[in-house]
Image (tube, helix red, strand yellow):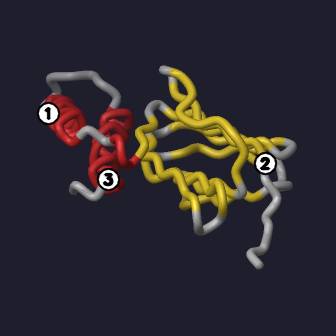
């Protein structure tokens, strides 16, 4: 008989709205210093997230929702985990053309910054590039 894990509330939120909200057994997010895995009853935590793969384990190892997520913040308090990210796309919903277009636009703007023709924020552009590349990787289309 499978080990029944304790569930907790998980929210994955973007500026456009909620990408996922519900109970899960575990969430794994791409922290700045490496992946962060959280189970129920985790100690309070606040972390900076980078672009990467966010995985919500509805049933550990059996039912997993994977999202390509952009940079943001992660907070855990009292059996509730909230990831606030600039974008979240389910792996199966990645639009290759959109991701490639985002990648090309961010790379072009970064080149303008390097030539001194733009004052755009380098870190934000690097994160946009990483997020577009991540969408393609998570969807298996890189």
Image coordinates of residue 15 in percent, x first then y, are 51, 22
In the displayed structure, 72 sits above or below 38; it is above
- Residue lying furthest bottom in this view? 1
| Residue found at x 21% / y 42% | 96
Structural distance between the alpha carbons of marks 2 and 3: 27 Å
Q: Quadrant of the N terminus?
A: bottom right
Which comes sooner in the sequence, label 1 or label 2?
Answer: 2
Image coordinates of residue 125 in percent, x first then y, are 31, 35
In the displayed structure, 114 sits above or below 5; it is above
Query: In terms of depth relative to the viewer, which is nearer, 45 or 13?
Result: 13
Q: Quadrant of the C terminus?
A: bottom left
Which comes sooner in the sequence, label 2 or label 3?
Answer: 2
Numbered badge on residue 139:
3
Numbered badge on residue 118:
none
- Label 2: few (<14), some or many (≥20) within 10 Å? many
Disc 3 element: loop
Residue indicated by mark 2 = 8
In the displayed structure, 104 sits above or below 59; it is above
Which comes sooner in the sequence, label 1 or label 3?
Answer: 1
Disc 2 element: strand
Disc 1 element: helix
Residue indicated by mark 1 = 108
Image coordinates of residue 37 in percent, x first then y, are 65, 60
């Amino acid at each position: 008989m499978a080990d029944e894990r304790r569930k907790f509330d998980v929210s994955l939120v973007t500026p456009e709205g909620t990408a996922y909200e519900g109970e899960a057994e575990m969430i794994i997010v791409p922290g700045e210093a490496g992946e962060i895995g959280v189970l129920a009853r985790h100690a309070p935590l606040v972390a900076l997230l980078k672009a990467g793969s966010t995985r919500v384990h509805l049933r550990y190892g059996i039912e997993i929702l994977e999202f390509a997520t952009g940079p943001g913040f992660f907070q855990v308090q009292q059996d509730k985990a909230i990831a606030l990210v600039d974008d979240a796309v389910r792996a199966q919903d990645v639009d290759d053309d959109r991701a490639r277009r985002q990648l090309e636009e961010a790379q072009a703007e970064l080149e303008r910054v390097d030539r001194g023709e733009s004052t755009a924020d380098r870190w934000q552009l690097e994160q946009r590039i990483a997020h577009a590349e991540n969408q393609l990787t998570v969807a298996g289309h890189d």
